[in-house]
Image (cartoon, rainbow, N blue to C red):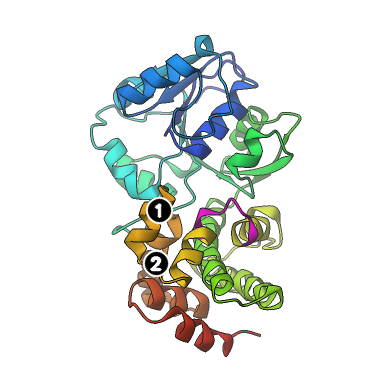
Amino acid sequence: MTEINGKSRVAIIGSGSWATALAKILIYNLPELNWFIRKEENIELFKKFRHNPNYLRSVEFEMSRINFYSDINKVVEDSDILVFVTPSAFLKDTLKHLTVDFGERYVISAIKGIIPDDNLVVGEFFHEFYDVPFDQFGVIAGPCHAEEVARDLLSYLTIASPDVKRARQFAMLLESPSIRTHISDDIWGTEYSAVLKNIMAIAAGISHSLRYGDNFQAVLMSNAIQEIKRFVDTVHPITRDIKSSAYLGDLLVTGYSQFSRNRAFGTMIGKGYTVRSAMLEMDMIAEGYYATKCIKELNLLHHINMPITDSVYNIIYENISPAIEIRLLTEHLR
């Protein structure tokens, strides 16, 4: 595989807020950027107004430096690095017309979700269905909300890949005055942690809407990181620092931030919204909804003690009263 540098052809696959934020980050160091947006009408609006018509409208782009695509095969052919930023539930649909082989292209996931039904994190999905070797795969992790990237607020990203050299090269394409990067070889831990923290944020939102205060939220987050550690250490037992920003930092920002869609989703559920009505009002995907069912099913194989995940599952899939379920959860926290 060719070395990653400022001349590498990088493609963003996706058109949401995080995809837009990553495009803003990457274009800082690249002369041009390839960008796959499925709907032609959104591309035309983007070109007309010089910003994403649906997300982060304050971020303007130089149209001369962006090559738009609505053909997934063409963007793969024209790119060396593919950064996937679609919701996990839509990844299969995004790739359903793909006929081009990934070859030696470097595949990066910024999805922070798990593939429904298959119960696979994104690296496993690309490996099993598209024969992408794990050393050609990387993960963008860490506490980094798109809304703050849009405002150039200092943020930290972790790039995880078994090929640490490639991860370091790609990280250099993300560096800017407002973005700092760290490197990791733990693709399994960072992916699963990113999936689990969304479930924990739903629990935080539900608890908040039920008027549990900051004291309880602190206990909830303390237990949440322990639950994440038990899971990732079981499914991929290596030495890792669970207190680092890719794990604990991402959990905290997702559990507490005003920009957290999973916390917002949980808040609505706690107030009595149905799952469907909460999703419709948010007009965004809460990855934790899909993750809860996937992790619950995966844990049938591992039998890990996961009281927070179990409680969220009982609320959003078994229709158990949030007030009753969270009250029961309080008896399991320490």
Point out the image quarter for the C terminus. bottom right
User: Please, what secondary structure does the residue beneath circle 2 have?
Assistant: loop
Residue 225 part of the magenta segment: no
Which segment did they paint magenta? 256-262
Question: Is residue 222 visible to us here?
Answer: yes
Q: Is residue 166 above or below residue 8?
A: below
Residue at the extreme top = 64
**Quick one: 214 or 7, which is closer to the camera?**
214
The residue that appears at 43% across and 48% down in the rendered structure is 123
Q: Amino acid at mark 1?
A: Glu
The residue that appears at 48% across and 18% down in the rendered structure is 49
Q: Is residue 9 above or below residue 133?
A: above
Q: Residues within 10 Å of mark 1 (few under 14, many from 20)?
A: few
Q: Residues within 10 Å of mark 2 (few under 14, many from 20)?
A: some
Q: Which mark is residue 290?
A: none
Q: Amino acid at mark 2?
A: Tyr
Disc nearer the start of the sequence (1/2):
2
The residue that appears at 51% across and 54% down in the rendered structure is 261
Picture quadrant where residue 21 is located:
top right
Q: Is residue 201 above or below residue 135?
A: below
Picture quadrant where residue 103 is located:
top left
**Residue at mark 1:** 281
* Number of numbered discs: 2
Query: In the image, residue 287 lies at what x, y percent?
Result: 44, 55
**Residue at mark 2:** 273
Query: In the image, residue 141 lies at what x, y percent?
Result: 59, 47
Say if mark 1 contacts mark 2, CB within 8 Å.
Answer: yes
**Quick one: 100 or 46, which is closer to the camera?**
46
Query: In the image, residue 184 lies at what x, y percent?
Result: 64, 47
The residue that appears at 60% across and 69% down in the rendered structure is 229
Q: Is residue 217 above or below residue 115?
A: below
